[in-house]
Amino acid sequence: MENFRFLAVACAAACATTSHAQHLDILAYNSGGKVGVGQYDFDNLETSARSVFTVQLPSTYADNDPGFSANPGPQALPTRTDLWWDFLPFRAGDYLGTLLYWDAVGPTAEFELTPTASYSVTLFGANGQSAAATGGGTALVPGQVIARTSSNGSIHQHNFFFLDDNGDGTNSTLPATGIYLLSMQLRIGTLLPSDPFYLLVATPGVSLAALSGVAEPWVNANLDALDQLAVTNSGDFNHDGFVNAADYTVWRDSVSATRFLAADGDGSLLVDAADYGVWSSGYAAGGATAVPEPAAAISALLLIAAMRPASRG
Ligand SMILES: [Ca+2]
Ligand SMILES: [Ca+2]
Ligand SMILES: [Ca+2]
């Protein structure tokens, strides 16, 4: 795997026109002044929106599928213009990141933080430059140029994705078996950027049943929730239908968190005193008479804030 970077650069040229008919490329098109993301029906010559794509990595943990395509015609992208990508932060349940992980065990997809924050999925651009969605990231990661459209607006490009557990650019140590989820958007010229779309990256040991039978339908069913970064609630931080002392405990135990956001009641992407306010209001609205005092936890929060510089980690 030491030669991966060389491989990616070589393929940016050599693989650009390679046909991968057995795979579903990510199709970009002009959807009324905005970048549409979807698939292409070669039988009926029609495009349709699609928001979830999958890849099962080979033993190299690198693959150049799905590729990126754009067609000429009435929905063509601007001609001779660079198509860019970005990695986007998204929220799955209580977890926020640009790269989340599910071990692919069980009947329901349960994405959470990657085993360590140093996990990443890198995408290499047509110009050899790359960007990575990381297990530690919570902000948009600006991407690179996927490809430049031709004189009729078309593109067919296969860039490499690479899953890495420790950021050293090789697979000398292997990422945990499972499915890695990331969110992307595409942008080109003066068109509005696309809506977020999702890529599920499965390690070699994952079954097709887990990837296409569980994870893909789960993402499709949760698109709105994934896109919505600022999720607010009434203080039911453990999702059991009641606002009570158990929710206070969730808040107390995650004060200052920026990635485990179960108790982020006001959607600020930080668990702090304001979220205690959300909880106490919800608690009072539920008819409770005694509200635990937040003094101890807030004191701890202030102490933490005083001891370290502002961190979004
Ligand atoms: Ca590595
Ligand atoms: Ca509750
Ligand atoms: Ca908050």
Image: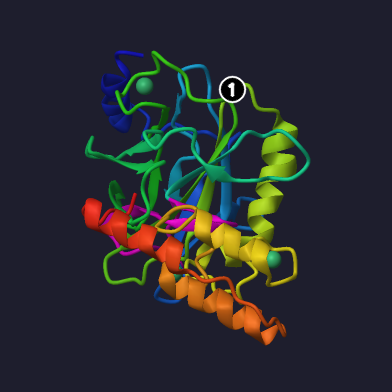
Residue 148 lies within the magenta run: no
Q: Is residue 76 above or below residue 55?
A: below
Residue at horizontal 53 percent and vertical 21 percent from the top: 58
Q: Amino acid at mark 1?
A: Pro
* Residue bearing mark 1: 204
* Residue 206 seen: yes
What is the x, y in percent for residue 289?
A: 68, 82
Q: Is residue 99 left or right of residue 222?
A: left
- Residue 255 sits in quarter: bottom left
Residue 71 lies within the magenta run: yes
Residue at horizontal 62 percent and vertical 80 percent from the top: 282
Residue at horizontal 56 percent and vertical 56 percent from the top: 94
What is the x, y in percent for residue 81?
A: 25, 58
Ligand 1 is within 8 Å of the C-beta of the residue at disc 1 = no
What number of labels is visible? 1
- The boundaries of the magenta stretch are 70-97
Q: How is the image coloured?
A: rainbow
Q: Residues within 10 Å of mark 1 (few under 14, many from 20)?
A: some
Q: Is residue 64 above or below residue 243?
A: above
